[in-house]
Amino acid sequence: MAANSSYAAQLNLNLPLSVSGDRYLLVVTDANKQVIEITGEENNLASSLIQIELAPYADLAVSNVTAPTLTIGDPASVTIDWTVTNLGTGIGKTSRWVDRIIASLDSTIGNSDDIVLANFTHDGFLEKNESYTRSEKLLLTPGFQGRYNLFVQTDATSQVFENSLETNNTNTANNSFSVVRTPYADLLVSEVQAKASASSGQLLQVSWKVANSGIGITNTSSWTDRIKLASDPEGKNIIADLGSFEHVGALAVGKTYNPSVDVTLPNGLSGNYYLVVTTGGPFEFIYTDNNSRTSNAVQVNFTPPPDLVVTNVTSPTAAQSGNKIDVSWTVANSGVGDAVGSWTDQIFLKQVGSGEQLISLGSFTYGNGLQAGKNYTRSEQFVLSSKEQGLYEVVVKTNTTNSLYENGVTNNNTSSTNPNNLLVSLTPRPDLLLSEIIAPTSANAGGTISLDFIISNEGTVGTNTPNWQDRVYLSLDNKISYDDLSLGSFSNGAALASLESYRTQANTLVIPKYFRGEAYLIVQADASGLVDEYPRESNNTKVVKLNINSLPPADLVTSNVIAPTQAFEGSKIKVRYTVTNLGIGETDRDAGQIPFG
């Protein structure tokens, strides 16, 4: 532009639908600041007041939403009807929008529990106060089931300008919208009856009635009814589970069953209590709030408990390990109530001075009941462990599993033979002693040796088995371990009476070629532990030192390696080579023992 020149411009603009009232039109020249204007740019903007009135707009409102209350099927088919009316000032500017059908678990649209069932597009303007009604048949997805609120929302994608009057775009059916895959049962506990009085720890008869008030036969043919005991009439404070009782047989609509059972009340109760019966298991849709019912009040009287006392525990004062002992004891009921049911008496050994550690000898169930003031005496025979020794108390405990209620008085349930205790001594056993080894003090690697050894029975009785194996080891230390070499095993030949002995000659025992230097010959009597010598097993071995002269060393040299200079991957090749012993002695291993490498 030349200095002091000008130009005129004209634009056709679309005003936003939502704008109304007094507004200003602002015109800015050189808006991108491309022209250098030395005198400043404050005069680059001009404005003009303009009064804007809203164009006629639509106001879509949903009404008359109808949906079935209950639909049964999988997949289910439902028909939804609704009406959309234009309550605005005109037809508006938009002729196309979406009506949406939504199932919701609550009364709020737009949160996470919404399920969009279908969208339907409307084409065409809607005059002021004009309406349209749609009826659509929907095939729901397979497996759809539940109880919902059904909504219809018009202009669901917000295409129509309604001047912020969208609150009437959504409406709901007056009834709930329920869909089930199959007809449901509705188990109702209609009554629970029990006797008005009972006793703690005793049986109480309970009867109840269950009816099917649903629309279909139960989908299972068996389920469980459960009885619990509560301390309040509402049945919320449960104090005991009294048992489960199975019902067998499908239940048709309108049919009932009426069982009666005996349950055992907990011990120690006194006061008013209530039986709570709960049923359930078959498919009942949402109708599970009537599956429980509480009985009338039951006055529970406290039953005087028994009190078992162990007395008169007797046993021999001396015995040998592995032998039988006779133990007798008496259990008396010193309580004011009868002992009903069964309980367990258990017998232990307790070593004097060893704390509370108990060794169980056996247990016995008594199931005949015991009246107050009565007692029973029992005698049993027990076998002591073959390794037991020392001074013991014989301890008897009754009601060890607390199956019998004694109201906490159990400190007298235990008694023992103290101070007439049981002294257990070890049963006499043989004692094999490796008394002597006659062996050379040196040997050559690869050579043989001979040795003699003498084994005696130092015990007071003969051996309990006539045959066992003695073994000779060559070891690098003076202890038998996994890396020792067995040079030979030798049978004793016959049982050994007290203080008898035998001599064994072990000839031509081969010393391996690779042994050299200081080693040990170890002889072990009864190497497999067949003779019971407890606790004197430590004298079954004896050790002598053996010095082994090594062989002259070999010196293997590999030479003359002949191999191909080229080969294919995965193919075979032939290699020739020569191994020569340039040493002064032969190898201590055969060629077959040398690994290829």
Image (tube, rainbow, N blue to C red):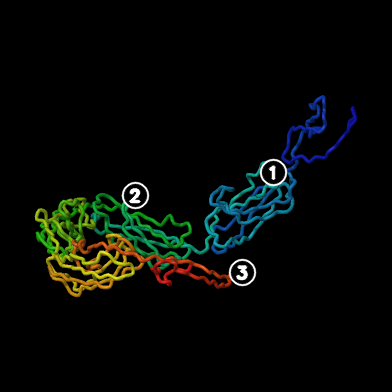
The residue that mark 1 highlights is 162
| Mark before the other along the chain sequence, 1 or 2 | 1
Res 237 label:
2
Q: Residue at x 25, y 70 (%)?
A: 450
In the rendered structure, the answer to whether residue 148 lies left or right of residue 361 reads right
- Is the residue marked by circle 3 packed among few (<14), some (14-19), or many (20+) residues within 10 Å? few
For marks 1 and 2, give the one nearer the viewer: 2
In the rendered structure, the answer to whether residue 283 lies left or right of residue 151 reads left
Res 33 label:
none
In the rendered structure, the answer to whether residue 96 lies left or right of residue 583 reads right
The residue that mark 3 highlights is 566
Judged from the image, the secondary structure of the residue bearing numbered disc 2 is: loop
Q: Residue at x 43, y 54 (%)?
A: 289
Q: Residue at x 79, y 34 (%)?
A: 32
Judged from the image, the secondary structure of the residue bearing numbered disc 3 is: loop
Distance from the alpha carbon under mark 3 to that under mark 2: 91 Å
Distance from the alpha carbon under mark 1 to that under mark 2: 56 Å
Q: The disc labelled 2 sits on which kind of residue?
A: Asn
**x, y percent for residue 24:** 76, 32
